[in-house]
Amino acid sequence: MLSSSVDGAVDRIDAALDALSSLDLSALSADELIRLAGRCETLARRQAVLAADIALEVNRREAADLGGAPLKVLADWLRITPAQARRRATLAEPLAPRRTLDGQP
C-alpha cells in the first residue's frame, strides 16, 4: 500500500490521463494538436525519469526486504525484462545523489 500522499498524487495523474484520453482530438485545431503532442512528449519524458529513479531506489534496497534480487523483483512486478529494469536503474545512477559509505546523503 502506498502512503496517502503518494497514492493521492498517482490518483491525480490517473484522473488527468482519463480526462485527456476522453478528448475529441478531431475537434482540436492543428496548432492545438501540435501543442498537445509537445506537452504529452514532455510528460512522457518526465515519467521516464521518475521510472528510472524508482528503479534505482529499488536496486538500492536489500534483497531480504523485497523478497528477492531487487531488479528481478521489479522486472517481475512490472512485467518487463530484467535487462529493462537494469537499464532504468543504470540511466538514473549518474544523476542520483551520492551517498557516503555509512549511507548518509
Image: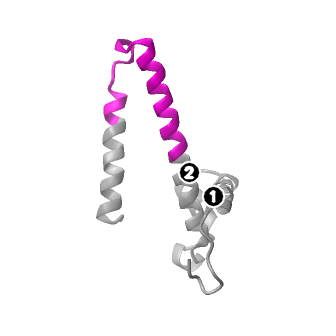
Q: Position of residue 42 (x, y in %)?
A: 51, 37
In this view, 35 is above or below 83? above
Q: In terms of sequence position, does the residue under pointer 1 or pointer 2 come before the other?
A: 2
Residue 31 placement: quadrant = top left
Q: What element carries label 1?
A: helix
Q: How far from the left and from the top, in percent, is residue 3? A: 33, 66
Look at label 2 and name its amino acid.
Val
The picture quadrant where one finds residue 71 is bottom right
Query: How busy is the neighbourhood of tag 1: few (under 14 within 10 Å), some, or many (20 plus)?
Result: many
Task: Identify the residue shown where x is 36% and y is 64%.
Answer: 2
Q: Which residue is found at the position 55% from the left and 47% from the top?
A: 48
Task: Give the labeled residue for mark 1.
Answer: 92
Question: On the rendered image, what quadrant is the N terminus found in?
Answer: bottom left
Quarter the C terminus occupies: bottom right
In-front residue for pair 57/62: 57
* Vertical side of 44 occupied by 49: above or below: below
4 and 29: which is toward the camera: 29
Q: Image height check: is 75 above or below 34? A: below
Q: Does the magenta stretch include residue 22?
A: yes
Q: Give the range drawn in magenta.
A: 18-46
Does the residue at mark 1 contact the one at mark 2 (Cβ under 8 Å)?
yes
Q: Quick one: label 2, few (<14), some, or many (20+) residues within 10 Å?
A: some
Inter-mark Cα distance, 1 to 2:
7 Å
Q: As drawn, is 62 to the left or to the right of 84?
A: left
What main secondary structure does the magenta stretch of the protein show?
Answer: helix
Task: Where is residue 97? Give x, y as percent.
Answer: 59, 68
Tell me, what colour scheme is on the image?
one colour
Query: Mark 2 sits on what residue?
Result: 49
Query: Mark 1 belongs to which amino acid?
Result: Ala
